[in-house]
Amino acid sequence: RLGGMRLTLCSLLCVAMATGIYACGGNQTDSELRYEFSTETVPREYIVRYAGYHGNEARACLLSGALAGLPCAWRAVRRDNPAAQHPSDFDLLRLAFNCTPALTAEATRRLLASDAVRSVTPQRRVTRTLHGFGPADEDVELPRWHSRRSFSHAPIVSGGLGAGVRPAPTQITSALQADVLWSVGFSGRGVRVSVFDTGLAAGHGHFKRGRVKERSNWTNEKTLDDGLGHGTFVAGVIASYRDCLGFAPDADLYIFRVFTNAQVSYTSWFLDAFNYAMLRRIHVINLSIGGPDFLDRPFVDKVWELTSNGVVLVSAIGNDGPLYGTLNNPADQMDVVGVGGIDFDDRVARFSSRGMTTWELPDGYGRLKPDIVTYGAGMRGSGLRETCRALSGTSVASPVVAGAVALLYSAVLHRGPVINPASIKQALLASARRLPDANMFEQGHGKLDLLRAYQLLRAYKPQASLSPSYIDFTDCPYMWPYCSQPMYFTGLPVVVNVTILNGMSVAGRIRGEPLWIDGQNGRLLTVSATHSELLWPWSGWLALQLGVAEAGADFDGVAEGWLNFTVETVGAGVGEETSTELSLPVRVRIAPRPPRSRRLLWDQFHSLRYPSGYFPRDNLRVKLDPLDWHGDHPHTNFRDLYGRLRSAGYFVEVAGRPLTCYNASNYGALLLVDTEEEFFPEEVAKLGRDVAAGLSVLVLADWYNTSVMRRVRFFDENTRQWWVPDTGGANVPALNDLLGQFGVALGDRVLDGEFRLGDRLVAFSSGCDIAKFPDDGRLIGAGGAKSRLEVRAPVLGFAHAGSQPVRPGTGRIAVLGDSNCADSAHQLADCYWLVAAMLHFATAARLPAFADGFQTWKSAGVPPSPLPMRMEGSRLRLHSRSPPAAPPAAGLPDAVALPPRRRRGSRRFEAAGLSRGQPGAAAEDRVPLPPDRLSAESLESAIRNRQQTAAAPIDRAFRLFALSCTLLAAAGLLAFAASRCRRRLSRRARPGLAPGALVRSASAGIDQPL
C-alpha cells in the first residue's frame, strides 16, 4: 500500500507517509515487517533559540518582554526531563488557536528583534511505526526513504545475505580484532558513551553490572525501557559483554531515550538531550539516524556545539544506496564521523548511501563522504529477550565505529585534550584500509582498521590534515569522477573540495594564502584556491579550481604540482603545537582540446532541490521517495547517463553559473535536464544568439501542471492557507520562456506509460507533451496501437533552429518531455540510447533511423495543448536567483493557459490520481476560448468540456442526497448519546453511592464507573 505526503516550504515541513510489506530473513525464523512513517511540523509550536544559556526565570522574562501586549495567548511549554533544572539555550513556544497568521508573524518579528534571540523555527515531529510479524528479536527491514531522525536500517532478503557472500562471523569484535586490545587491558573503561535511541531495559543481561550509568527519558512516555529493540541492539554492539559481544564492555553507558515505542520524536527532545549530554561530559555519541534536511538549523547548530565541546559524534551515512548524492545529515557534516556499510566480503553494501555531499550545489562541488566504512550487513547484536538478533544497515555500522572509538579512547584517555573529535577522526581516516574496487564517494577513506588506528593514536601529535590527502586524476577507480575525464584548454575549471581537519584546537585558520608549486608540467595548469576563514569546529574546507593554460592546448600527458599552506590555532590549543604546514599533491591528466561537436555543457545552475524548498519528485507514481533531493547532477543521480556519454566519446562540463558566463562557441550542445530555476532575460537573449551561431540545445523536461500541484499540497494550520510545490517536476513555464524564441513550447499534460521507437520501448514517467513546435520539425508522438499512453500526444521532437530544414551555421533543438528514463533514481527502464540519438542529431545534424517517416508539426494535425501557467502564490521566488518572466502564453496567442484553481479541501494529502495518459488538468480548470477564436482544432475539446459540464447537475444531486443521509445518521447518534447521558445523570442522584462507585448496567450487564 502506498500512502500520502504533505509538504510545506514556509516551515521546512516534509511529510512522507508510506506503508508496505516485505519478507525479512531472520537468524531464527522468517518474519515480515509492515512500516509507516511521517515527519511534520507541529502546528503553533516554535523553537525559540537564544544567544546563550539562561535559567527558567530569565527565559520567562525574555519571552514576556518580547511578547508583551500580543493580542493572542501563548505559553512556554514545560519540558519534563532531566535537563529542565539546568540552564537552556531554547524554549518551546506554543501559540493559541486565536493567533492569526499576521499575529504569528508579529510574534516572530518581536522575538527576532531581541538581541538575546538567535532564531525562531518550527517544532518538528517525526513518526515511524513498525508492525512486525514474527518473534520480537528477528531481522527487520525498513523503508528506503529517510527523513530527519529516522533509523538507518537496510533490507535483508529472506534467507540471509544471499549467495556468494561470506557468512557473518560469530563475533564482529573478532573480525576487527578488538580482543587484541582487550588482552592488553583496554576495554572502554573510563569512557562515557551515550546512545540516542529507543532506550534500554533495566538489568539487561548483556551488560555488566554498574556499566549502565544512567537511563534518561526525553519522550512523553513514562518509561525508560526499550519496547522496540533498536536501542538495545545499538547499545549491545557498543558494550555487550556476553553472547553477542560489543567493543567496549567496560564503557560507561548513558542511555538517552529520544524515541517513543511508536518511534515518535521531536526536535526539542533532541536539543534538550544534547544539552544534557554536554552537562554529563559525554565522550562519544552514537546517532544511528539521519535525513536529507541539512538546513534544519537548530539540529545542525547543536551538532556543531556538541563537537566543539569535545564530543565525538558518530552517525550513519544512510541507506539510500546505490544512488549517489544520497548522504544523510548529520553524517555529512565535516565535524562528524560519517559511517557507511560493507558486507563480509569487503564490498560496499548496496544499501549504503553514496557521496558526494550536496550542500555546495549548484555553485560548487561536493565533499568527500562517507568518512569510513565498516561491517553493516547481517550483523549480530543484543535483542530484547537477552538473545542475539541480526540486522543490516548503516545504523548497524555506526555503533560498530562508535564502539571502536570508545575502545580506542580508553587506550589513550590519559592524554587528555589531545584526544578530541578531530584527532579521533584523523586516526580513523589515516588508518583505514582502502577497498580495491570502490571509489572515494562509496568507501570514503576505506575500511575501519582498529589496530592501526590504535597505533596512530598512541603516537599522535596534534596536527592538521586533509581529506582527501591528495588529488590524482589518474588514480581510477578511487578518484572517480575526477579520473573519468581529462582536462583540456578552454574547459571549465574543475572544482575539488578538500576538508581540513584541525586536531590542534577547536578553532583555527589558514595563515596567509596557499602557494602553488609547479612540478612536472605544472606550468600548464592554472590553480586558484579559496578556503573557509575560520576552521570551526575542528574543521574547515579548501576549494581548488583547476584549469589548463593556453600553453597546454595541444599537450597530452600528466601535469603535477603541490599546494602548500599553513594551518594555525586560534586561541588556546590542546598541546604545544600551534601550527602545521600542509602540502596537497595534485596530479592531473591533460588532453588536447576536443572538437566542438564532442563537448557538452550541462546546466547545473538552474537545478533546485530539497531541502532549500519544496521540490517534488519527478515521477508522481513513486510515493516512498517524495522529494527531489539528489542534486540532479551528472555525478549523483545522473551518474549512469554521464558514464554512457563518456563511453560515447563526449566530454561533459558542468555549468554552475548563469548561461551568460560561458563561451558557447566551445560547445556542441547545451543540456537542460530537469531544470527548476527561472531564467534571466539576459540568458534568454544570449541563448538565442548562441543557437544562431551553431549551439544546439537538448531538453529533458518533466511534468508541470497546476492542478496536479494543488493535489500535492497540504493545509498549513499556522497560516490557514494551502501550500503547493514551488515547481512541478521541472519548471516548464521557465523552459517555455527560454524556448519560445525557437517556436518550441511544452504542454501541461501529465503523461505516464510506454511507447515504442523502432524495436525499443521507452518508459515515460510523469512527463509532459510538446504543445508547440516549428512547422518543419519532426515529431514523434505517443498514443496508438504501439503505445500504452492512451492520449495521442507528441513527446519527442527534432528541429533545426532556422526556418529551413537545414540551415548552415545554426544549431538544432531536441526535446523529450521526460527525464526519468535518464535518471538513476526510480528508473523503470533506461533511455540512454535515446539521449545518444538526440545528441547525435544535435551535434551532427543527423536524424536517428527511427525518426524516418515521422510527421512534421504542420502535417501531424496535433490538437492544441494547454500551456502550463505559473502557480499563483508559489514561493519559488524565495529560492530563485532570477525573476520570473512574462506569462508563457503571452507570445503564443493560440495557446490555452491554465489559471490557478481556488478550492477548499481537506488537510490530507491528495494523491495525483492520474490514469495513464490522462491530461493533468481537469475540465473545470480550462479557460474556454472566446467565440471569435474558437478554432477547428479546439472545437472537439470544447464539446468534450460541455458534455462533462452537463453531467454536473446529476453529480450535485447525488452529493446532496448523500449529505442528507449523513446528517440524519448524525442526528440519530446524537439523540442516542443524549439518552445515555440522561440515564447516567439519573443514576448519579441515587443515595448511598460514592463518586466513582460501580453500578450494574441493566441493559448491558457490565460494570461502568459513575
Image (tube, rainbow, N blue to C red):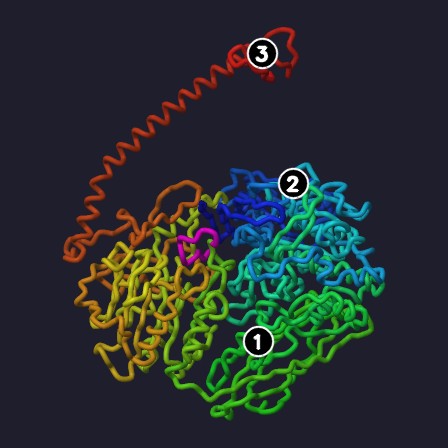
Q: Is residue 697 magenta?
A: no
Circle 2 is placed at which residue position? Answer: 227
- Front one among 929 and 193: 193
Question: Marks 1 and 2, Cα distance to the nearest angstrom?
Answer: 44 Å
- Helix, strand or loop at disc 3? strand
- The residue positioned farthest toward the top in the image shown: 991
Residue 634 vs 593, above or below: the answer is above
Residue 533 in view here: no
Instruction: Please identify the dominant SS of the magenta region.
Output: loop
Which numbered dot is residue 1000? 3
Q: Position of residue 844 (x, y in %)?
A: 32, 81
Circle 1 is placed at which residue position? Answer: 479
Residue type at numbered disc 2: Gly
Q: Quadrant of the N terminus?
A: top left
Q: Position of residue 890 (x, y in %)?
A: 27, 63
Residue 306 position by quadrant? bottom right
- Front one among 937 and 452: 452
Q: Quadrant of the C terminus?
A: top right
> Neighbour class for label 1 at 10 Å: few (<14), some, many (≥20)?
some
Q: Position of residue 358 (x, y in %)?
A: 54, 65
- Give the residues drawn in magenta, as a range: 614-625
Residue type at numbered disc 3: Arg
Residue 162 position by quadrant? bottom right
N-terminal label among 2 and 3: 2
Question: Marks 2 and 3, Cα distance to the nearest angstrom?
Answer: 37 Å
Residue 238 position by quadrant? bottom right
Residue 909 vs 408, above or below: the answer is above
